[in-house]
Amino acid sequence: MKAVVLVGGEGTRMRPLTETIPKPLLPLLDRRSLDHVLDHLARHGVHEVVLSSPYLEDTFHPFIEARAGDPAIVWITETEPLGTGGAIVNALDRLGDESFFALNGDILTDLDLSAMLDLHHAKDAAVTIALHHVEDARAFGLVDTEADSRVRAFREKPEAPIPGDINAGTYLLDPAALRDWAPGVNRSIERDIFPAVIDVGRRVFGFVSKAYWLDLGTPEKYRQAHFDMMDGRVHGVSYPSPWLGEGAEVDLRAHLGRWVAIGPRARVGADAQLDDSVLLSAAVVGVGAKVVRSILGPGAIVDDDAILVDTVVGEGARVPAGLTLEDARVPAGSVAERA
């Protein structure tokens, strides 16, 4: 079984973290986010994965070289962004003639991929789309299905807060359904390809499940993913809370709330207070500093008595002593200033 994992986005909503690290390579507790995605695929019999990205491509190669075991990784260089549909079409010559998975690389889920594959075969589907039910669909496009789960149409984002089934970003695709699309063209799988496949009468079905599902596209969701994994909300995954990576140092007089993740070699000083926050590798929080609902990128430094609330600090950036920041973004490598 093969898969395409879509990792080409620039992660603009996650800046400044994604100024230096592609979103799929951001750490998620003890591994990269993409590691969790690949491990999940391997558990469901996927043995080869195709990746491609024009954004910060060089950062992916050390990850690929260090990755061991299933699934094997095939890299395709994109000279320019191809979108979700274009990236999949561009990979078709690496995927053979059997149905394959395609999925967004910024989704954390415990979706039962094996059950989804069973439905795909049972329905003799050209396309099967994982669906997730939400109570407020305003941030997503809705997917309309028949009683037998056949997909009728994709609807635009509603203006009112209504419940519905949304595209969960995991697909099973018959290569024959995509062969007519020319490679090397920027296309959306959701807006261009799926509606066209439905219009020509091919069999497109939805797979609705109650699986855990979280889009890691914002700092708030990225933090929440850490906390959910520590709480055991993702099936088969559990971490201690608070979580400390290898080589992390926390002063005995520091206060750590329940939902705190401290990456490897990070340091927290005496009388510091951390709540609902994530520190990536080698980040430093000084004596008496306070960090609440915030993220510190690799090597970021929060000096003594500084206060951060709802703030994201980029890689190698510094927050000077005594400075208070709220709802701020500190670019990578910079020194924060008073507003």
Image: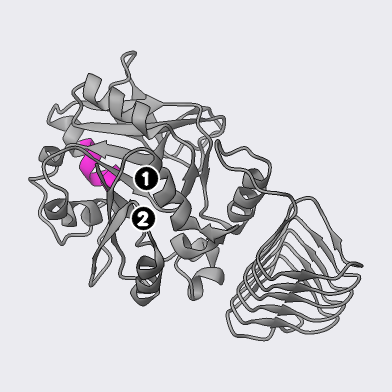
C-alpha span from label 2 to label 1: 9 Å
Looking at the image, tell me whether mark 2 or mark 1 is earlier in sequence order: 1
Q: What percent of the width, then of the height, locates residue 53?
A: 31, 66
- Where is the N terminus found, in terms of image quarters? top left
| Amino acid, disc 2 | Gly
Residue 222 in the image: above or below residue 266? above
- Identify the main secondary structure in magenta: helix
Viewer-nearest residue: 12 or 156: 12
- Where is the C terminus found, in terms of image quarters? bottom right
Category of crowding for the residue at label 2, using alpha-carbon neighbours closer than 10 angstroms: few (below 14), some (14–19), many (at least 20): few
Identified at 79% across, 50% down, the residue is 258
The residue indicated by pointer 1 is: 42
| Amino acid, disc 1 | Ala
The residue indicated by pointer 2 is: 69
Q: Is residue 329 magenta?
A: no
Identified at 71% across, 69% down, the residue is 248
Magenta stretch: give its range: 189-195
Whether label 2 touches label 1, CB < 8 Å? yes
In the rendered view, does 17 fall on the left or right side of 174? right
In the rendered view, does 315 fall on the left or right side of 153? right
* Residue 224 visible in the picture: yes
Identified at 37% across, 34% down, the residue is 113
**Label 2 element class:** loop
**Label 1 element class:** helix
